[in-house]
Amino acid sequence: MRWFLLGLAALSLTACEFEEVEREVGYKGKARVNPWLAAERFVERMGLEVEPVIGWSAPEIEESVWMMPASVLSNESFTRRMEEWVREGGHLILLVDHADGQPNDWSEHAMPPVLEGALFAMLERAGIELKASGRAAAKRVRFEGRRYEVAAESRATVAVSGRKPGVFASVKTGYGRLTVVTDGRIFRNRWIGEKDHAALLGALLDVTEYQGPVGIMRGDGLSLWSLLAEHLWPVLLGLGVWLALWLWKNLTRFGPLEAEAAPSELRGYDHHLEALGDFQWRVDKGASLLVPLREQIVELGQHLSVRSGRRDDDFFQFLAERAELPRERVHRALAEPAPADSAILTRTTADLQTLLKVLNHRSLS
């Protein structure tokens, strides 16, 4: 019966309705980290040598084409060196939008490029007008008398001076050529196989007068910190919290300085005596502190009673008369073996000191 119920449950599960949803999440392998891998392989099939470029470096004279993000040319030093290379016969292809090193072509988050004044000045000298604000879209571009079907849309516009702005502009400069494409997606892995994107790239390579290596720059260069910020932000967040706690623990607190601690009151002489008396009380109830006083009082009292002719009188009464104390207190001070508590010890010590003072005074007189 148990197996029958299990089989019935399995059959009931197979009757559940479900829907399969297929969602593209990106490439695997090299294409996941290199958004220009398809373009590099396309150039290789054309029989040209490809030189991937990670960070900024000036192209060599033997290189024929360079494709790179326009945002890399951020200062006069870079633009002057690129202009010199173009005038000597190189072909510079600048990608404006979607040209960074973000490898995921399926990501919906794309930051606008940061374009510097040196770039605009270089393009202006070549006869190209680039505007970072505004939107442009095109289904076709014209190059060297031929039209190419494209799917381009960008947040920047470009045009040869005096012509209608769009997404593509190309002019000769010296012995070389300068080309600007505002939508870099048409040459990225995901879209290069659509429309005439690959054909347009091939035409840009063929127009160069001499054949040489082709340099393709991956965004603005990969750096350890950018990779950490993109992929390891939880680690960075944890390190930041740890650093904040470490600083809070080790650095000086804000606010006024704490006052210096006052010296301990136990360093006073009277407190030393108090501590000593407390110790003696716990050892023998203070009896050892009273013995020296009692012996000295008895010795002085006997000498005084002999000189006074009262050797045979009551010794305690004799001392009580001299100190003006009750006989019981004098007897307790001299004869009591150990005080019952600290209060009696204090009173007994005071009586002994009074007797000693009187006897010393009598002896001197």
Image (cartoon, rainbow, N blue to C red):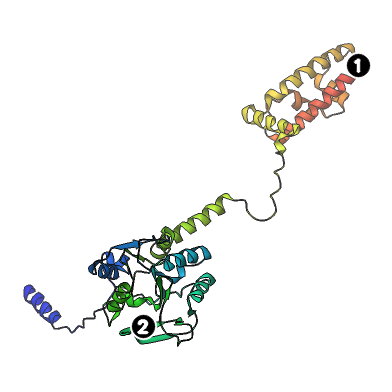
- Asked where in the image residue 23 lies, by quadrant, the reply is bottom left
- Image disc number at residue 67: none
- Left or right of residue 53, residue 302 in this image: right
* Residue assigned mark 2: 152
Q: Quadrant of the C terminus?
A: top right
In the rendered view, tell whether residue 338 sits above or below residue 307.
below
- Of residue 251 and residue 279, the one placed in the foreground of this image is 251
Q: Position of residue 129 (x, y in %)?
A: 49, 80
Amino acid type of the residue that numbered disc 2 sits on in the rendered structure = Ala
Q: Of tags 1 and 2, which is closer to the observer?
A: 2
- Left or right of residue 134, residue 364 in this image: right
- Of residue 335 and residue 79, the one placed in the foreground of this image is 79
Q: Position of residue 142 (x, y in %)?
A: 35, 84
Tell how many labels: 2
* Residue assigned mark 1: 364
Which residue is at 70% across, 34% downward?
342
